[in-house]
Amino acid sequence: MVGGGVAGATIAHKLSQAGKRVVLIDAGSADAMDPDRYRSMLTNYYGMGGLRGTPNGPYPINHDALSPGTPDPDPYYVQRGPMNFMSDYLRMLGGSTLHWQGTSLRLVPNDFRMQTVYGRGVDWPITYDDLQPHYREAEEIIGVSADVGDQRNLGVWFPEGYVYPMTKLPPSVVDQYFDARLQGVTVGLALAHPTRIAILELLSSGELSAGALIEKLGMEQANVSQHLAVLRAKQIVSNRKAGNQVFYSVRDPIIIEVLSLMRTYFHAHLKEALGMLDEMEKPLETAR
Ligand SMILES: Cc1cc2nc3c(=O)[nH]c(=O)nc-3n(C[C@H](O)[C@H](O)[C@H](O)COP(=O)(O)OP(=O)(O)OC[C@H]3O[C@@H](n4cnc5c(N)ncnc54)[C@H](O)[C@@H]3O)c2cc1C
């Protein structure tokens, strides 16, 4: 077996369990397998900061088997595409798995039924239920950090008494901030419609009456009222009555920030996607 990261080690383990004799060859040193040596690398990481404060920072440079980040990721990689590979990997027994953060999300049941549920893509020939025992086995082998209660959503189920092998990662300060501000607001579903996004865009500069919204959107009253009802039910907009008019406003301006972040994200990735398409066109044009 060439390479002793999680993939090589798991295959080697399974083969040896099946009675095969396996030789595992790795390009890097076996230092990190020694607990004291591993601990010294952690101290290295926390003490280093600055220049080598990268994921590969703690690990000793092996001049016979260089890795990205030793000393700088960019000269190491040969990056030919429009989007650079931004992460590290490690040549050392244990591989990039020494970096393992512990995040590995299960697909949700509807991911296997995209055509039936959403009319998009194709349905898989297997279901979440078929994969469930294998998720358990893989999570045990690779060590996944999570809390069953947090992950039990969108139909994901776990067998009675299931516990992830590692405790969940603590939420970052940014996670905590968004969580506190969005308490009780099911933003995702409520925003998943172009008309509702358009309504919020219109309300971003201030309160508007239902009549003004209908006029600006150029849509039927019943249709707009339906979308306003969803946004109200999800506590994204609030309303007040004045005479025979109903005025709507965004309940918490953070929603506008969320929309703006989403717009920035999609713009950035649209540009990347267009760049990639341009790159893909080039060889075709040359060939012609
Ligand atoms: C900072 C960081 C955090 C990450 N966090 C997560 C996460 O939370 N969730 C997630 O899903 N993924 C995460 N990943 C990615 C994940 O760790 C890797 O995808 C995974 O470890 C790869 O496993 P592997 O066995 O395929 O390869 P590796 O672990 O990279 O193993 C490859 C092995 O092959 C050896 N090797 C390489 N070339 C040769 C050669 N020519 N001859 C002999 N041996 C060779 C190397 O020394 C190494 O031991 C993270 C990656 C990084 C860098």
Image (tube, grey):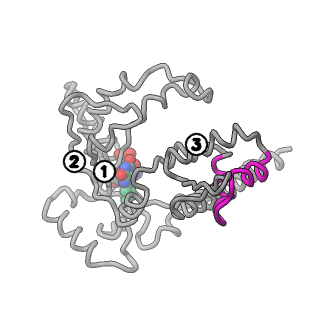
Residue carrying label 1: 102
Q: Is residue 156 magenta?
A: no
Circles 2 and 1 in contact, beta carbons < 8 Å: yes
The reply to whether residue 81 is visible in this rendering is: no
Q: At 86% across and 44% down in the image, what residue appears? A: 288
The reply to whether residue 57 is visible in this rendering is: yes
- In which quadrant will I find the N terminus? top left
* SS category of the residue bearing label 3: helix
- Tag 1 or tag 2, which sits nearer the N-term? 1
Instruction: Determine crowd level at label 2: few under 14, some 14-19, many 20+ residues with C-alpha closer than 10 A.
Output: some
Q: Nearer the viewer, residue 249 or 1?
A: 249
* SS category of the residue bearing label 1: loop
Residue 203 placed where, x, y %? Answer: 65, 59
Please identify the residue farthest to the right as the structure is shown. 288
Q: Nearer the viewer, mark 2 or mark 3?
A: 3
- Tag 3 or tag 1, which sits nearer the N-term? 1
Dominant secondary structure of the residues highlighted in magenta in the image: helix
Above or below, comparing residue 8 to residue 200 in the picture: above
Classify mark 1 as within 8 Å of ligand 1 or not, answering yes or no: yes
Residue carrying label 2: 166
The magenta segment is 196-218
Spatial CA distance of label 2 from label 1 is: 8 Å
Q: Nearer the viewer, residue 266 or 261?
A: 261
Spatial CA distance of label 2 from label 3 is: 42 Å
Q: Amino acid at mark 2?
A: Met
Q: Quadrant of residue 104?
A: top left
Residue 132 placed where, x, y %? Answer: 33, 28
Q: Is residue 213 magenta?
A: yes
Residue carrying label 3: 229
What's the mark number on residue 250?
A: none
Q: Nearer the viewer, mark 1 or mark 3?
A: 3
